Image: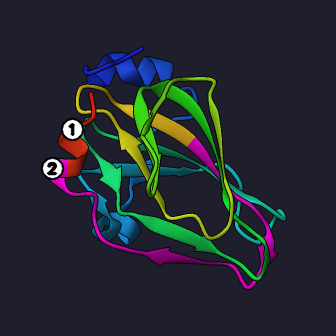
Amino acid sequence: MKIIEKEKFEKHNIFGMGEFNKNYAKYFIGNSFLNPLTEINKANIFLANITFEPGCRNNWHIHNATKGGGQILICTAGEGWYQEEGKEAISLKPGMVITIPTGIKHWHGAKKDSWFSHIAIEVSGENTSNEWCEPVSDEEYNKLS
């Protein structure tokens, strides 16, 4: 369900918006918010609820690892997009799960007319790192409907 009004969205965003994602803001077009659900170094896996304002998306990026790694997205509120390089974008709705293998260039974010949240799960692996690439252009993004 698309939700454009922030107050209405917050009622559906069951894991909470969290704080402005200032540490990664340079890798996003628009504003995103981060609510960690696990504490770093207290669990073998890191989970966070990421919220995107309407039109917000992250840059193309790659999750690298020599073994294991990758990312899992669990869509929880609003509507968004996920796209792998060279493939059509996938419309995201609550309840959908996206598994992103290591080495796949991709991006994800909100639709133009909806807030969007997903839980991001960083899959454990060896020598994991994120490689941030170019922004998703307005031209690319505005083709999506």
Quadrant where the image shows the C terminus:
top left
| Image quarter (top left, top right, bottom left or bottom right) of the N terminus | top left
Are the residues at dot 2 and dot 1 in contact (C-beta closer than 8 Å)? Answer: yes
Between 29 and 65, the one nearer to me in the picture: 65
Q: Residue at x 84, y 65 (%)?
A: 44
Q: Is residue 125 shown in magenta?
A: yes
Q: Position of residue 83 (x, y in %)?
A: 45, 47
Number of numbered discs present?
2
Number of other residues with Cα within 10 Å of mark 2, as a class: few under 14, some 14 to 19, many 20 or more: few
Residue range in magenta is 119-139
The kind of residue on which mark 1 rests is: Lys
Looking at the image, which residue sits at the far front? 86
Which numbered tag is attached to residue 139? 2
Where residue 35 appears, as percent x and y from the top left, is 53, 49
Q: Residue at x 24, y 40 (%)?
A: 55
Q: Residue 18 location, x and y as percent?
A: 46, 46
Left of 61 or right of it: where is 104? right
- Residue 94 magenta-highlighted: no
Q: Which quadrant of the structure image shows residue 119?
A: top right
Q: Which mark is residue 143?
A: 1
Q: Residues within 10 Å of mark 1 (few under 14, many from 20)?
A: few
Report, in whole angstroms, how far the alpha carbon at label 2 lies from the one at label 1: 7 Å
Which residue occupies 43% across, 41% down? 88
